[in-house]
Amino acid sequence: MSKHTPLYDQHLACGARMVDFHGWMMPLHYGSQIDEHHTVRTDAGMFDVSHMTIVDLHGTGCRDFLRYLLANDIAKLTEQGKALYTGMLNASGGVIDDLIVYFFTDNFYRMVVNSATREKDLAWINQHAEKYDVEIIVRDDLALIAVQGPNAQDKVQSLLNDEQKQAVIGMKPFFGVQSGNLFIATTGYTGEAGYEIALPKEQAADFWQQLLAVGVKPAGLGARDTLRLEAGMNLYSQEMDETISPLAANMGWTIAWKPEDRQFIGREALEKQRETGTEQLVGLVMREKGVLRGGLTVSFTDDSGEMHSGVITSGTFSPTLGFSIALARVSQGIGKQAVVQIRNREIPVQVIKPGFVRMGKPLV
């Protein structure tokens, strides 16, 4: 039996096509995935992300626990509300999940983890928390709505009271603040400005209606995927999983190697991988007709003339750019050109750093 978010009835009322997404009935689109994509790039769209799991951590052991649990170092978080992106790794350096963690005080942090990995994440967190003075509270009482796009923040602010407006005006990216009944964060998964807003689930439908009334359009999983791919953002289970190192998933920047005496889960394995080298995640651009899809083979010749092959992890037609883009895992040594096998044809592709569109502007 699939679970429903607090906004399930709102999706039906908006004409959503619902699909099962890791055990949750979620909107795929509300009529046109392409229109929803363009709305987020040019105006403001909203996504129900209540299927994600919010985990609050309280206690004097929080700081030490999270410095051990996560590959990035929460000691960097010194300003109240500041957030960072990190992998949570196993002992072999594979990615159990990628997540965002917010700092409130040394005794209070908040993590937002993926829906597909909820049960194993919570089991892993609880298992390793046993040695620390930490209380773990899963916030299933909250709904989560992401409002994204160049006009998203203005439209949300039009609904806030004076105290909430003061709390968010001028807030830098990757911060969060609790004001009244709303937790408002300047985070997202689209490459656009916006907010991710957590609020009591019984208030979610009313807030959704208020957003509709100020011209924020609903958007589904389909647009969410094309938007994140244009932004060059990873999707768990496609770009990384428990067998894939963050070094092979364009997540090397999320590993805090210093201070060198900080022990975190997976560190020893990562240090060996850093010495021996790993595969890498690259972006692909195909200007010919056709669509790059996950699972297709990517081939290239290195400087010594040796042939190598890799695999596309995520691919799509980019509505913003008008041609196909992809992320691919390949060996080191790839240059600026490669070929992809599509229906027995070898089609040339351009190789770039992951990231194709940011803040509505093409990067290619």
Image (tube, grey):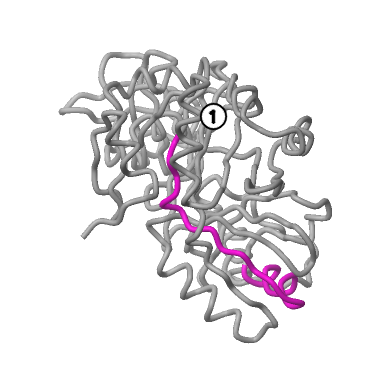
Structural crowding at the residue carrying mark 1, measured as other residues with C-alpha within 10 Å and reported as few (<14), some (14–19) or many (≥20): many
Residue identifier under label 1? 148
Q: Is residue 312 left or right of residue 77?
A: left
> Which quadrant of the rendered structure holds the N terminus?
bottom left
- The verdict on residue 50 being magenta is yes
Residue occupying the point 48% across, 70% down = 122
Establish if 7 lies above or below 228.
below
Residue 212 in the image: x percent, y percent? 46, 25
Q: Residue furthest bottom?
A: 131
Residue 292 in the image: x percent, y percent? 30, 28
Q: Is residue 29 left or right of residue 362?
A: left
Residue occupying the point 66% across, 28% down = 157
Establish if 13 lies above or below 143.
above
Establish if 2 lies above or below 151.
below
Establish if 127 lies above or below 187.
below
> In the rendered structure, which segment of residues is drawn in magenta?
47-69
Residue 110 in the image: x percent, y percent? 64, 59
Residue 168 in the image: x percent, y percent? 74, 36
Residue occupying the point 63% across, 77% down = 135
Residue occupying the point 78% across, 30% down = 170
Q: Is residue 25 visible?
A: yes
